């Protein structure tokens, strides 16, 4: 089966929804993918604004929702009242450490945690379809 790039996937989604592929949406997607971070609408808007002042906040917001609807981004809520979007790239599953002081978000992978979750699920006759692990605390910098 052929793996489509996020751009191809997004364009196909727009066609199926009867929506237009626009230059603004392409610019927003390029910046979103380039950022490789957990971005709020405001953060992505500010990244775009300098070079593309014609792109409005509402356009960025609606486009991020389209990314989530088509499956190339996942909305995340880390307890700060903002929705952040994370690319659903091929990097595989990871979990998050979130600093409750400065808001830093650290991604991590741990095979032992994944294996333990699978073991617990099996013990209870449960099949995991998806999961999310978020650990909240204070980062090294904020502990100083």
Image (cartoon, rainbow, N blue to C red):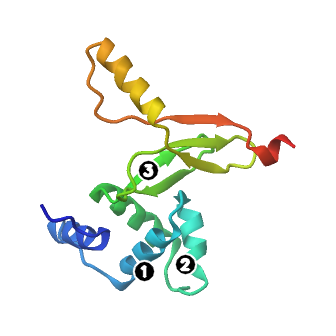
Whether residue 34 is situated above or below residue 39 in the rendered picture = below
Q: Nearer the viewer, residue 62 or 134?
A: 134
SS category of the residue bearing label 2: helix
Q: Residue at x 44, y 69 (%)?
A: 33
Point out residue 103 in the picture as x, y percentages from the top left corner.
Answer: 68, 49
Q: Quadrant of the C terminus?
A: top right
Q: Residue furthest left?
A: 1
Question: Which residue lies under the disc numbered 2?
Answer: 48
Upstream in sequence: badge 2 or badge 1:
1
The residue positioned 44% from the left and 72% from the top of the image is: 59
Name the outermost residue toward the top.
Answer: 124
Figure label count: 3
Q: Secondary structure at mark 1?
A: helix
Left or right of 8, for residue 25: right
Q: On the picture, is 44 further left or further right than 19?
A: right
Residue nearer the viewer, 58 or 109: 109
| Mark 1 / mark 3, whichever is N-terminal | 1
Residue at 35% x, 56% y: name it: 68
Spot occupied by residue 71 in the image (x, y as percentages of width and height): 30, 56
Q: Quadrant of the N terminus?
A: bottom left
Q: Earlier in the sequence, mark 2 or mark 3?
A: 2
Residue at numbered disc 3: 75
Badge 2 local density, few (<14 within 10 Å), some, or many (20+)?
many
**Residue 32 or 19: which is nearer the viewer?**
32
| Residue farthest right in this picture | 144
Residues at circles 2 and 1 in contact by the CB criterion of under 8 Å? yes
Q: Which mark is residue 27?
A: 1
Q: Are marks 1 and 3 in contact (CB under 8 Å)?
A: no
Q: CA distance from mark 1 to mark 3?
A: 20 Å
Q: Residue at x 48, y 75 (%)?
A: 31
- Whole-percent x, y for residue 113 in the image: 47, 30
């Amino acid at each position: 089966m052929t793996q489509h790039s996020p751009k191809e996937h997004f364009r196909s989604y727009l066609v199926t929804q009867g929506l237009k592929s626009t230059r603004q949406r392409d610019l927003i997607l390029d910046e979103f993918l380039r950022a490789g971070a957990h971005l709020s609408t405001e953060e992505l808007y500010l990244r775009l604004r300098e070079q593309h002042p014609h792109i409005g906040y509402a356009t960025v917001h609606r486009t991020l929702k389209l990314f989530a609807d088509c499956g190339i981004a996942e909305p995340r809520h880390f307890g700060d009242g903002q929705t952040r979007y994370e690319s659903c790239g091929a990097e595989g599953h990871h979990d998050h450490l979130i600093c409750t002081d400065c808001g830093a978000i650290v991604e991590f992978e741990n095979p032992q945690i994944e294996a333990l979750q699978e073991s617990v699920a099996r013990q209870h006759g449960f099949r995991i379809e998806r999961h999310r692990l978020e650990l909240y605390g204070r980062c090294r910098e904020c502990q100083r």
